[in-house]
Image (cartoon, rainbow, N blue to C red):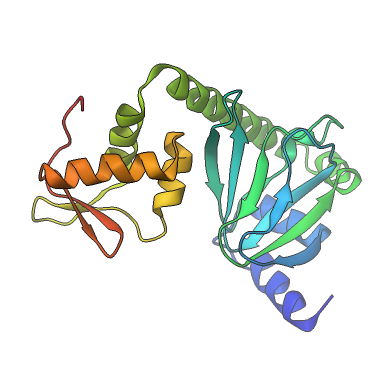
Amino acid sequence: MSADLDTLTQAFCSDPAHPQAVRELAALGTPRRYRTGAQLLYEADRGDTLFVVMQGQVRAYGIDPNEREITFGLVGPGDYFGEMALDGGPRSASVITMEPTACALVSRDSLLAYIAKQPTFALDLLGKVTRRARMATNSARNLAFIDVYGRLAQLLGKAAQPQGDGRATLPDNLSHQEIANQVGCTRDMLSRILKDLEGAGYIELQDKRIVLLTKLPARW
């Protein structure tokens, strides 16, 4: 282990801002660093490793039967992913890093030994699996029953941060490509919808950042 990773792991494991169980799991794992855009997991691959995120952020996503990419969620420091394949089955999602990221890789044997020592963690693990399964189901349902504009309006409404002057801005880290991924459309289609909304005075694009000027219409 490099001195840099050793220091990062020690700092993470001693930081009370993170759940105790997650810190203890990280201490059992092997730390690794990854560059932006590194593919950590592939959907349907076999795997027996749980990843504890100590630094950075990753995105979990899948591909539907129409080859559309669906984002299931983002995972940041103090959280973990990969738990749904610890039964020896296939991975339920692909995972890619959104920025330089450091993770502690915990083997299935180490995780089972930890659960034997701390059986209450099994409830946390079960809750995590349930929430993520529900999130994946809702994402698939939205793609099936809501049109592209409807999904976009829903996403922008949830992610926009009010500025106090009637406007609302999207977070800097929510790129147009990430919006297209979450909405389930191409980047070109997203650009066309945004251009139309801008022309109608609903939004403003400032250095590729979306600013909502007024509430978006229910239909477009």
Answer with the quarter of the image where residue 148 lies. top left
Give the percent coordinates (x, y) of residue 165: 8, 55
Q: How many marks?
A: 0
Seen as rendered, the residue at the extreme bottom is 3
Q: Which residue is drawn at the image coordinates 77% and 47% (left, top)?
A: 50
Q: Toward the viewer: 162 or 146?
A: 146
* 166 up-or-down from 145: above or below: below
* Residue at x 69%, y 36% (from the top left corner): 125
- Taking the spot 33% from the left edge, 46% from the top edge, the residue there is 191
Work out whether 102 lies above or below 111. below
Query: Which image quadrant is residue 76 in?
Result: bottom right
**Residue placed most toward the observer, 211 or 16:** 211
> Which quadrant of the figure contains the C terminus?
top left
Residue 65: x %, y % from top left:
61, 23
Instruction: Give the quadrant of residue 113.
Output: top right
Q: Nearer the viewer, residue 43 or 165?
A: 43
137 vs 172: above or below: above
